[in-house]
Image (cartoon, helix red, strand yellow):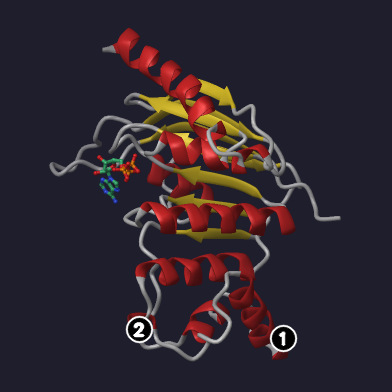
Amino acid sequence: MASMTGLVVEIGEKAFPGASGGANPPLYKDFRLEIADRAFVALLGPSGLGKTTLLNMIAGVDKAFTGRLDFTNGRRPRISYVFQSPRLLPWRTVLQNVALPLPQGADSLKRARAAIADVGLAGSEDVYPERLSLGMQRRVALARGFAVEPELLLMDEPFVSLDEANTAKLHDLLNDLIAARPTTTLFVTHDSREAVRLADRIVVLEGPPARIARDITVPLTREARRIPGEIERVRDLVVGRLQSVAAVNG
Ligand SMILES: Nc1ncnc2c1ncn2[C@@H]1O[C@H](COP(=O)(O)OP(=O)(O)OP(=O)(O)O)[C@@H](O)[C@H]1O
């Protein structure tokens, strides 16, 4: 059984330096977010509020903040970060791109091949990214993310700019990958339908500074998410609540 991977994020303060040398108003102040082991949390909130910054702080990419990250297993988990753009190295093949974050060793190419097969791209191992459609590039980015068997998966609008049919396929794929290898997931999106489609819990941020305006449990089993009409029905509930938030604050 995999180890526990829940986390508690406490940010005393996070502000970026301003152009004139001082600090900009804080994006986060006395902020706390608790995420249970193996939860799938979607993070919704207005543009520029600091959602990517939050992922960067959790990933350890941005260390310039006061506060702390507590991981329930007592150590930093294996983290994968899937970005808005696929960020594939153009001079490397699909196989080389997926193997990149893996520890060097005899096993790494085998693991990368398995991850590529899991996202439906077996046969494309030796292809260079520029030959792939955006949907396929996003699959490669997912394969790279899952190849390391993450305990914590951070995703920043990973399916943006895809058409509806491709987005639906990638939603199903992500659900299947997580069902096969449970992991704690924090997923940033602007799309409430996508949030309902994927997440167990939707955290709606407002601000600045960012605060949790709504914390919504999504009352849908994984199976129910495949039933036509269920996503819309639940989204209407969730969006209704989001609109009431806007009305209160608007
Ligand atoms: N390195 C940086 N230096 C200065 N300001 C930054 C830096 N990175 C981000 N910001 C600013 O911090 C704010 C939050 O940015 P962030 O990308 O985290 O927001 P976001 O909620 O993810 O936005 P979006 O939904 O549009 O992706 C923005 O005003 C952005 O311009």
Kindly identify which residue carries mark 2: 131
Q: Residue furthest front?
A: 228
Left or right placement of residue 17 versus residue 76 in this view? left
Residue at position x 15%, y 44% in the image: 19
* Image coordinates for residue 59, horizontal then vertical, percent: 52, 53
Work out whether residue 180 or residue 31 is closer to the camera in this orientation and state it: 180
Left or right placement of residue 44 versus residue 177 in this view? left
Work out whether residue 54 or residue 1 is closer to the camera in this orientation and state it: 1
User: In the image, what residue type sits under mark 2?
Assistant: Arg
* Location of residue 69 by image quarter: top right
Q: Is residue 176 in view?
A: yes
Q: Does the residue labelled 1 lie within 8 Å of ligand 1?
A: no
The mark lying in front, picked from 2 and 1, is 2
* Location of residue 132 by image quarter: bottom left
Residue 242 lies, with reference to residue 203, above or below; the image says: above
Q: In which quarter of the image is the N terminus?
A: bottom right
